[in-house]
């Protein structure tokens, strides 16, 4: 599989908020300001977005959409306490809170409650209840738009349920030691799969639970189903899981020594964002483990020598290190592991490829073949054993 080279991202330039003219233009102006603020958030220009958002709230202090965007922008600029207050203002008992409450406010607050897992669980469940109410209130979809809305609601329900599972399984919380933890996770995942039976994120969450139960074969089956649900989709398909979910899937593949599908998922991620630090790290880690496996099995793996695989690993890890530094990435343990692996490759005499060297040691077009943990059939499907 060829490695993706980094490329520069285009920079966008935003303008200052438009000046208010007359009170008669208040409503269309708020609409325009909301649209501009949302655009700036998408562009990650949070400071300028805040200027637009505050102008909206000056005109309409109860505007729920602006309050939510305020929370998002504050969160992205590191103003955690202020962001929390902005989201709490959207929920009872705040007298200006909209009715019904926006489920997104509960989801943000759940993620901001790292030190209070029970509070986070309450917010996730509140979001689930609102989503379920919205789903029940919909007439069976008869057109593409209606079906899309229903699918989005189901996906939101599943993610909120998975958020609860992750809290129950997190070893940093005492909840994972509670006697009801395992059954609670099973019930939450059963509800998720009942809501959306082929949801890849639910399937990989179930795989994670099965791995914790030492049910490796069941875990592999869940991962195979999860990957099959999206591997043939276009990268811009709305059904494609978000990059963090796909990275989580890659980690599970690597943990089960399923390197072929791990690399194929990474290939898709890097096609969307070739500056994703964690993707470069995982690709480097995957090639490193394949190199180790090659050394243990006679020096080659899928017609590649362990040295070729190690060189691929070195290239990926060095790219990861550069991106980590340039982006000031917050994951310090990841960087420490990258440096540790580069040190081990140094000790083996493995150097990085020249900048313009062809990637002859990498498989082309993602057509890896592996006999030990999986095989690629003539249609490109991976069969896990």
Image (cartoon, rainbow, N blue to C red):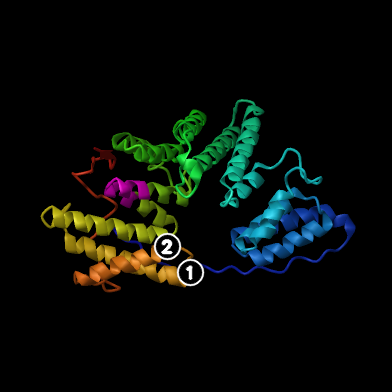
Relative to 287, 21 lies left or right? right
- Which residues lie in the magenta part? 251-264
Camera-side residue: 208 or 103?
Answer: 208
Q: Residue at x 44, y 56 (%)?
A: 272
Relative height, residue 347 to residue 281 (above, below): below
Disc on res. 327: 1
Q: Position of residue 50 (x, y in %)?
A: 70, 63
Q: Quadrant of the C terminus?
A: top left
Relative height, residue 99 to residue 364 (above, below): above
Relative height, residue 97 to residue 180 (above, below): below
Q: Main secondary structure of the magenta part?
A: helix
Q: Position of residue 106 (x, y in %)?
A: 64, 44
Residue 69: tell me if it is visible: no
| Dot 2 or dot 1, earlier in sequence | 2
Furthest residue in direction left, as rendered: 298
User: Badge 2 is on which residue?
Assistant: 277
Disc on res. 268: none
Q: Are marks 2 and 1 in contact (CB under 8 Å)?
A: yes
Whether the magenta-drawn stretch holds residue 98 is answered as: no
């Amino acid at each position: 599989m060829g490695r993706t080279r980094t490329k520069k991202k285009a920079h966008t330039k935003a303008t200052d908020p438009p000046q208010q003219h007359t009170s008669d233009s208040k409503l269309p102006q708020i609409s325009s300001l909301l649209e501009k603020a949302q655009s700036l958030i998408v562009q990650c220009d949070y400071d300028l977005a805040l200027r637009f958002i505050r102008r909206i709230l000056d005109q309409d202090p109860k505007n729920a959409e602006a309050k939510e965007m305020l929370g998002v922008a504050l969160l992205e600029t590191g103003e955690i306490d202020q962001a929390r207050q902005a989201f709490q203002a959207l929920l009872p008992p705040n007298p200006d809170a909209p009715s019904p409450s926006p489920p997104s406010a509960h989801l943000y607050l759940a993620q901001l409650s790292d030190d209070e897992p029970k509070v986070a669980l309450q917010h996730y469940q509140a979001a689930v209840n609102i989503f379920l109410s919205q789903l029940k209130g919909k007439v069976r979809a008869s057109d593409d738009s209606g079906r899309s809305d229903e699918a989005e609601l189901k996906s939101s329900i599943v993610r909120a349920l998975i958020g609860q599972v992750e809290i129950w399984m997190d070893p940093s919380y005492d909840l994972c030691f509670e006697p009801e933890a395992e059954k609670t996770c099973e019930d939450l995942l059963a509800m998720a799969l009942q809501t959306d039976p082929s949801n890849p994120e639910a399937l990989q969450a179930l795989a994670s639970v099965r791995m914790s139960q030492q049910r490796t074969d069941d875990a592999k089956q869940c991962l195979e189903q999860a990957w099959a649900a999206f591997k043939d989709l276009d990268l811009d398909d709305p059904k494609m899981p978000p990059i963090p979910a796909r990275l989580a899937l890659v980690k599970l593949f690597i943990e089960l020594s399923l390197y072929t599908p791990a690399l194929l998922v990474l290939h898709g991620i890097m096609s969307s964002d070739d500056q994703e630090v964690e993707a470069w790290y995982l690709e480097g880690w995957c090639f490193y483990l394949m190199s180790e496996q090659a050394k243990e099995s006679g020096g080659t793996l899928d017609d590649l020598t362990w040295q070729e695989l190690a060189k691929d690993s070195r290239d990926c890890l060095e790219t990861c290190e550069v991106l980590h530094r340039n982006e000031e990435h917050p994951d310090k343990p990841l960087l420490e592991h990258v440096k540790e692996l580069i040190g081990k490759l140094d000790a083996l005499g493995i150097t990085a490829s020249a900048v313009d060297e062809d990637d002859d040691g990498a498989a082309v077009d993602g057509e890896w073949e592996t006999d030990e943990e999986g095989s690629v059939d003539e249609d490109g499907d991976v069969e896990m054993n």
